[in-house]
Image: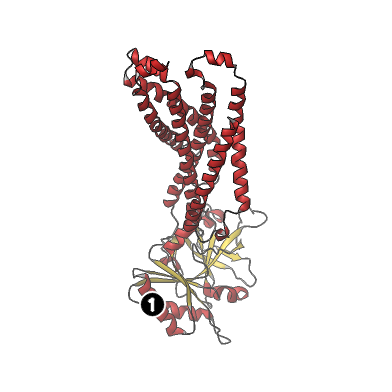
Amino acid sequence: LLTESIILAFFGGSAGVGTAFLLLRGMLAIHPPDVPRMHQTAIDGTVLTFCMLVSLTVGILFGLAPALDAARTDVKAGLRERAGSVGRGISRYRSILVIIETALACMLLIGTGLALKSIWSLRKVDLGFVPRNVLTFQIAAPSQPKGTQLSDFYRQIAERIRAVPGVEWVAVARDLPLSGVDPSTPILTDGKNAAPVQGEIVTRYRAVGIDYFRALEIPLLQGRAFDESDTASSPDVAIVSESLAQEYWPDESPIGKHIKPKIAGSSWCTVVGVAADVRHWGSGVVIEPTAYYPYMQVPESIRSLLEANMSFAVRSGLAQNDLLHSIKDAVAAVNSSVPVYGVRSMDSMLADSGALRNFDLTLLSAFSLLALSLAAIGVYAVMAYSVSQRTQEIGVRIALGAHSRNILALVIGRGAMLAVTGAAIGVIAAIFLRRVMSSYLYGLSKNDPFVLLVVPGVMILVILAACWTPARRATKIDPIAALRYE
């Protein structure tokens, strides 16, 4: 028996390695581009050796118990027993393995279900802005004559793009949502300060143009947006996010209050508006307090750094190719030597922000379906083996008048017992798994039983379907042939 187990393990491991080569190609074809060094992933000699050693070790471990059991069998007593009882010990080990397979499959399927539910919840999250019909790009800032400001260059480009038919709004900003850049700096207020975190409150710093909130459709909850009067020579102003307002002025309006970023050369800024919170990094990232400043009023100490890397967001219903052509013409009209680069729609940026999460979910789903398939095959094998070993018993039952539905119930009931036992163990283990996953996945409740009930139910139905073929075969046993064999 042990030798047979090793041979089966060897051929099974070889088939698994061959399948892995095919699956690896599929994984490399669908992986997101931001996964580091993914193109270097390969199955090398070390991996092959490890897989074959694991296969052989598993074959030895799981073949050892039935081999020892068979070695202890009393030959004389075994010959006196009915033929149908010879494989009871092996059948017991098979049943235990099937229960373990089912429990593990149930855990993986519940984990996949929780991840799917989390992604569905993320699709309904309010980002705080509208990414649809927004095209973003960057331009390389040209060298300016001494005494001139790059802010005039950006203003001219924005005005020319805004004049294009079909363009609704044009925003200029240092950092756009989903751009992957999000600088922060502590701030001071002219009154009470919130309790410090590690000594200071860190607030996101955004330098934006006058139409930033209109172009991204970020709601203003109080006050006003920036306008043409907010220039380098006018009093410094700021707009705070709702979370920042709640943090510093929880019981009063922040309009008219003053804040000051802790940056060399910065001035006190009057708060003129409160904007809705924006999820800068994507739907799955927590909201952070944010302060917005007109980019023409940024301190001189950081002006060159900010203005050299400004981005544009253009809201328009035009086709992307037509809009991009008009944008390039508008930029060339101001400075023909300035290239337009980093062109991306905000919809694609939003999709990319969740690409790695979706890739992980795809792999988890594949492993879960594989585990479910193995559990179903295991139950089928046990049921088929059980039917072959109980041929005489089933023949006697049929000869005594047992109906086909009774035989079906007998065989499927055995499979149901294995499936329910494994599912119950899997659900218990998944309860602890859910507590861990709830801290990593969005929108999961520790008291939400939906996935814990639906997934095991579906899995049990799949396994019962796998029992149908051996159960039907049992109903077709010829009682005369079975009794003659007896």
Judging depth in this view, the residue of 11 and 439 nearest the camera is 11
Report x, y in % for residue 4: 56, 33
Comparing 362 with 81, the one in front is 81
Say whether residue 36 is visible.
Answer: no
21 over 486 or under it: above or below: below
Return the residue nearer the eye: 431 or 108: 108
Residue 378 screen position, x and y as percent: 47, 33
> What residue is at 35 percent from the left and 74 percent from the top?
322
Task: Residue 314: name its quadrant.
Answer: bottom left
Residue 120 visible here: yes
Residue 344 in percent (x, y) is at 45, 68
Query: Mark 1, residues whose alpha carbon is within 10 Å: few (<14), some, or many (≥20)?
Result: few
How many labels were placed on the picture? Answer: 1
Front residue (pair 376, 67) = 67
For label 1, the residue is 325
Residue 259 image offset from top left, x and y in percent: 58, 64
Colour scheme of this structure image? secondary structure
Task: Give the image quarter of residue 44.
Answer: bottom right
Q: Quadrant of the N terminus?
A: top right
Q: Quadrant of the C terminus?
A: top left
Circle 1 SS class: helix
- Lateral position of residue 143 relative to residue 408, left or right: right
In the displayed structure, 321 sits above or below 71; it is: below
The kind of residue tagged 1 is His
For this orientation, the residue located farthest to the right is 199
For the point 64% across and 53% down, the residue is 197
Examine the rendered structure and indicate whether residue 340 appears above or below residue 126: below
Q: Which residue is drawn at 57% across and 13% down?
A: 77
